[in-house]
Structure formats: C-alpha cells, structure tokens
Image: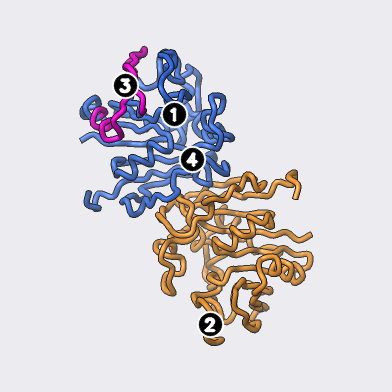
Chain colours: A orange, B blue
Amino acid sequence: MSRVRVHAFTVSLDGYGAGPGQTLETPLGRGGESLHGWFIPTRTFQRMQDRPGTTGPDDDLAAEGFENLGAWIMGRNMFGPVRGPWPDDLWRGWWGENPPYHVPVFVLTHHAREPIEMEGGTVFHFVTDGIEAALARAREAAGPRDIRIGGGVSTIRQYLEARRIDEMHLAFSPILLGGGESLFAGLDLLALGYRVEKHVATGSAMHAVISKNPEKPE
Amino acid sequence: MSRVRVHAFTVSLDGYGAGPGQTLETPLGRGGESLHGWFIPTRTFQRMQDRPGTTGPDDDLAAEGFENLGAWIMGRNMFGPVRGPWPDDLWRGWWGENPPYHVPVFVLTHHAREPIEMEGGTVFHFVTDGIEAALARAREAAGPRDIRIGGGVSTIRQYLEARRIDEMHLAFSPILLGGGESLFAGLDLLALGYRVEKHVATGSAMHAVISKNPEKPE
C-alpha cells in the first residue's frame, strides 16, 4: 500500500514550524525564512530554478522527499495567504504556472473552489470535508505511489494525531523563533507510536526520520 | 564580572529535558536516560570514573562546562529524589562522597537544611529564599569565576525568564520523549534577548550555544 510521508519539514530549536506574525510578505512568520537555511542551497531546491546546488546529506534528504510521489496534501495556508471565502480565482499558489509538484495536490480548506490545472501535471483540488476525505482522494489519485503531506504545522499535527503519517523527516534548524506554530506542544508522539528511526547531523541542520511503530496496533 | 552559564543541558527533539514519571529509579523520567547518549561516552564523563573516553566535539563541549567555575546552582530534584520536608540527613546527593563539583553548590529548596561538606571541595548549601538569593550567594562564593546552573528544567526556565543566564549550551538528542518537562513551552527566548551563537552537529547530538544579546537593554 502507498505510504504517507512528510519530508523536509523544518522546525526551530524551540520547536516552531513557523514564527509569529504570518503575513503575505512573511508567509513563515517573523524569522521563519531562516528555517530553510539548510534546504535553499541544495541541488534539489536550486535546480527548480535551473541553478546548480550543493550535494551531500542535506541534498540527499531533500531529494528523497520527491521520490515515488503520486499526490500531495497541504493546508490552505501553505497554498496561499488568502483567508476566508475565495474572493476570486486569481490566487494560483506561490509557485508560478509550473509548480514543483507535477501530481494532484489536495488543499485542505473550508471554502470550496473549482480545481486548477497548472502546467507540468500539477492540479490543485480543494477539499472541504476534512483530512480523512483528503487522504482518501489522495490515495485514489496516487495509486501505488506515496502521498506527501506538505504542511503546515496544523495539517501535520492533525495527520499525526490520526496516526496517518507513516514516515516523517524533520529538519531542526539552529535558530530560535520564540513563538509561532509549535509542532510538538501537547502532542505525545511516543504515545502515538512514533520513534526516531535514524538521524543525520550536518553543518546546517539535524535531520531526524521519525516513523510509526508497526508493532503498535492501529 | 563572572558569568552565569548552562552547559550540556540535554533535551529531546520534542523539547523535553526529562520524561514523564520521574521516580527514584528513573530520575529523568521514562526514556530520559537516553538523553545523555552523547555525553556518557565522553572523556569528560568517563574520567570521573577513572575510565578512558572519547574525544572530539562532544567531549570539547562537555569539558568547557567545567572550566572556570566558582559555584553551581541546582534545583532540588537534581540534588535528589526526596520531596517535601527533609525526613533526616541521610540523602547526600546522587554522586557519592566526592561529587564532581569541587566548589560550593547552592540547592534551591523550600525546606531548610544545614550545609553538607563533602570530599573534594564540594559543599551543598540549601537556599530557601528564591533564585535571586541563590544567585547572590553563588556570586559571592564564585568571586571572579563563573556560575553554572545545573538544572533541571524548572530551574533553568526560572533563570531564563529572569534573564540571568548569559550563555546556555543545549544538546538535542535524537530521541522523542512524548511528554515530561518542556524547556521551551510558553518561553519566548527571542523576546528575552537570546539567540543562537553557534552550533555543532555530531553523530550523537546537535549542540547549540545560545547567548544573551548584549544589545538588548536589561
């Protein structure tokens, strides 16, 4: 069966996946853009802009996140800064006309909207009936391939609480954010059956791959 | 002036300095003993038992924590498992007759007790009038040398909130604890003027040295 995966999700040392005060100009909140210091230089990211990038463990982990994917799921705030009902159809994501997904992307929202077909195979679908419905649609779209949960914090926390995530690669960046969206607060990952499967430290981040304990009954 | 320092304070990836369910047998709570996987093999720790140990960045950071110290401060739970009024004078710390401090150690407690003079220069003093009184006594004892705050989480959080800590070395161990004592919950280290000064990743931990921004007015 296809697996549900999180990759390259980056948190500060104090556990925040986004800083306080998110706006259109600072979608990751105050200080949040510093989270991705490990990811930006990698070949995986840079080649999206046709530029050369670094190789090594940071890039290896970034690249793994794009292997064998058949669908993505993301929260609405990862899709864009618009809140409340969609005022029009102008917002088409942060990524331009050819987004780096190339598969169906299911966006969790409370506000219905027609699908958007982009260049390169990405189609944004808007799901208004919750995380399980989104996962069911993603499974259908992905077939034997895997499903990646993009973010943000709230989306990942909901799928963790439901024990739907099979594997989660977290990157800890050596910064403090002081506040914002905490990935861990009140979430007992051990009790949910998660454990650290492997870890890799680089000069830019500590990476941990967390997986669901198969011994724990569903 | 002498500085107030924290060293080798270890937290899990989910930010806990001790796991849930602390007892006499598991003073760091469930799973908490795994926190110190990076520290136990080091020469700095092993030579306390006259054994050889590893050198390298983990040991360098462990060793720095013992340089130029004139006093220690610790919470009562770091001193021992006894809670409430002292039933007798039998408990003399976890460390045997010659503890690894060799300077005055000020133990925060609500329950008065006579000082205990140990071998090797360690004297345990019990301070019942709060963190500022303990710090004043430690400063007097330390003279030009520095003061190390040992732990646990509650003690460190109180001194951070009071902006009394000048430098703090944290080690992030690649484990999950799921619950217990959170170092970060509700504590805005950025607003308190702290920032990550340097970081070193090893195969066993990600180390971060956090310091108080001197530009922020007291």
2 and 4 marks on the same chain: no
Q: Which of the two labelled residues, at mark 1 and mark 4, occupies the earlier sequence position?
A: 1
Residue A117 visible to the viewer: no
Q: Amino acid at mark 1?
A: Asn
Label 2, secondary structure: give it.
loop
Label 3, secondary structure: give it.
strand
Where are the magenta residues, as a range? B109-138
Residue B125, numbered circle: 3
Give the quadrant of the N terminus of chain A. Answer: bottom right
Instruction: Answer few, some or many: residues within 10 Å of disc 2's Cα (few below 14, many 20 plus, some between 14 and 19).
Output: few
Which residue matches tag 2? A91
Which residue matches tag 1? B77
Q: Position of residue A184 (x, y in %)?
A: 53, 51
Vertical relation: B24 (above or below) A54: above
Residue B181, numbered circle: 4
Separation (CA) of disc 3 from disc 1: 14 Å
Q: Position of residue B165 (x, y in %)?
A: 31, 40
Separation (CA) of disc 1 from disc 4: 12 Å
* B185 relative to B193 in the view: left or right: right
